[in-house]
Amino acid sequence: MLAATACIGYGFTEIALNRALDLGVDFIGADAGSMDPGPYYLGAGKPYVSPEAIERDLRLLLKAARSRDIPLIVGSSGGSGGAPHLQQTRQIVERIIEQERLDARLAIIGAEPPRDLIARRLAENRIHGLWPELPLDEQTVRDSERIVAMMGAEPLQQALRQGANVILAGRCSDSAIYAAIPVMLGYDPALAWHLGKTIECGATIASPKTGQDCIIGTLGSDYFTVEPGHPDKRCTTSKVAAHTMYENPSPYAFVEPSGIVNTLECTYEAVDDRIVKVQGTTFEPAQTYTVKLEGAMHAGWRAIVFAGIRDPILISRIDAFSRQIHERTRAEAAALGLDAAQYTLTIRRYGLDAVLGDAEPQAGEMPHEIGLMLDVVARTESQAQAVLAKARYIAMHTEFEGRLCTAGNLAMPFSPSDIPVGPAYRFSVWHAMELDDPLEIFPIEIADLDCRRAA
Amino acid sequence: MAQLKDIAVVLRSKNAGAFVLTIDVIFKTQQDYDRTVDGGALQPDRIAAAYRLRPSDIQIIPYPKVLSVKVTMPRRVGSGDLSDTDVYGAQQHVPLMLMELPGQAA
């Protein structure tokens, strides 16, 4: 099997793809999403890579898969795997099929469960918090902008049984993309899931790290191997073994809808200097089938200003200065009819403590320059801009003890200084929901496309 | 005194989901792993103090096969929430990186 890239749109080399195809892979998988970029992309229905990059990657993969008549499985389409993300990816795929004169039986698998069903499961105590506990009530279920559920291997297998050869899945377990076919064929689920987990980040497990690329996975009856598609790259035992740690709360166990995969007893062996062989994974089937729910809620509109502070006297007074901006902005916003509950002002002091906040171990060391960001979120776009304009004026001209720079406190890098960022979201749902059936909330639409003789 | 950055070959932080931060430390040598992880230099109370969290929030999970230890903790706010400072959690390893290791010379 071939894992094309860590994420559709992050790219891969044609050398690696062609080499993998020449070796005779049985199917191509590609993850297209993640929640790492934060709640905006889920809430706003937008991809976090460019449509141009998505189209480039999908064009090469569609041509490769269709010319060899092997399945192509894309998981978490469009980044977050919601309905608009799936629709955008579908449009790109249909356009490529038309332009390249291909044919395909396309399966589109939705992953936005109906709100009534989620509310009912919540009332039945069949939605469980993860650690750390995030409160969830019916209002949050109703008010969230978008809620997706992460499918396991079963909806992909169902689409394959219906004859699909190109599958665009909504939100989907990354490992399931690669586990679906082998598990359906009767291979050991422990090894199939572990192989999926190992290759779902593409060339992240290969050296040297020169951008994303393809990884080839081979599954046997009691082992699997991984090797880079690109001839100049290598997989090493330490990188492959360490990969189960990555972005996972446990170093060696990971949870899938149908069970827990444990790699603690695994052996990792170098077949040669680029291929690693893995054995000994165990799999504990889940008592109850659960899928992860991910939801994002609209949290207001954001506007920011970013400016430099270089004056050493001001830098030495930065804490009192920050408090002054908060206090005076509160008074000025009140004069506009906006009380403190109607907006948030976050003052981010780059160079001082903007990254680590009160956990900054070097907080006492004063820098010679600070990048000051004023970050306002309010209920409407115009309110955010109104509060920000007040805060910016205050920061520019507020007095501080020992001030000599009476003409202005900030170096503005450009005009206009104030930047509207758009809607802000927060994650509102991050829970596990029990299903009666692994297919229950993942509707499969089949579309037969044949553009081979089109003009 | 030595700091974790002096004896690690990888020291990285990342979200493990939107509400959990996880830090991977991979050591250069078996000896460094043994005296730091088995020697008890990483204690929940010290890590909690560095991150302004409660000791009960800190999970320390050794993974000797790759000479590594994982430190997992709740994020103070969800990824991308209004006051969040690091959406991917990619720069939150630094307080751990700079923690001093008692009994280990620099």
Image (cartoon, rainbow, N blue to C red):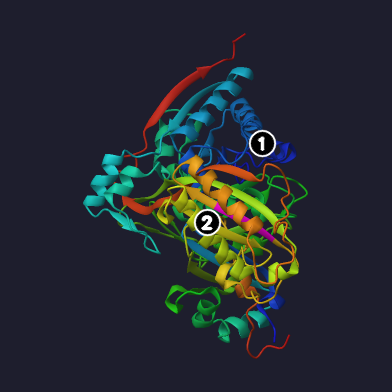
Residue drawn where x is 49% and y is 35% of the image: A85
Look at label 2 and name its amino acid.
Thr
Look at label 1 and name its amino acid.
Leu
Q: Is residue A265 visible?
A: yes
State the image coordinates of residue A346 (x, y, percent, origin top left): 54, 58
Label 2: few (<14), some (14–19) or many (≥20) C-alpha neighbours in 10 Å: many
Question: Which secondary structure, mark 1?
Answer: helix
User: Hey, which quadrant is residue A245 in on the image?
Assistant: bottom right
Residue A454, compared with residue A55, is above or below; it is above
Of A443 and A355, nearer the camera is A355
Residue A21 — which label? 1
Q: Are marks 1 and 2 on the same chain?
A: yes
Question: Mark 2 = which residue?
Answer: A329
Question: Which secondary structure, mark 2?
Answer: helix
Q: Is residue A436 left or right of residue A178?
A: left
Residue drawn where x is 74% and y is 69% of the image: A312
Q: Is residue A161 left or right of residue A349?
A: left
The range drawn in magenta is A371-375
Badge 1 or badge 2: first in the primary sequence: 1
Name the magenta segment's main secondary structure. strand
Quote the CA–CA distance across marks 1 and 2: 61 Å
Of A275 and A153, nearer the camera is A153
Of A373 and A289, nearer the camera is A373
Quadrant where the N terminus of chain A sits is top right
Q: Chain of mark 1?
A: A
Magenta residue check for A295? no
Give the label, 1 or 2, closer to the camera: 2
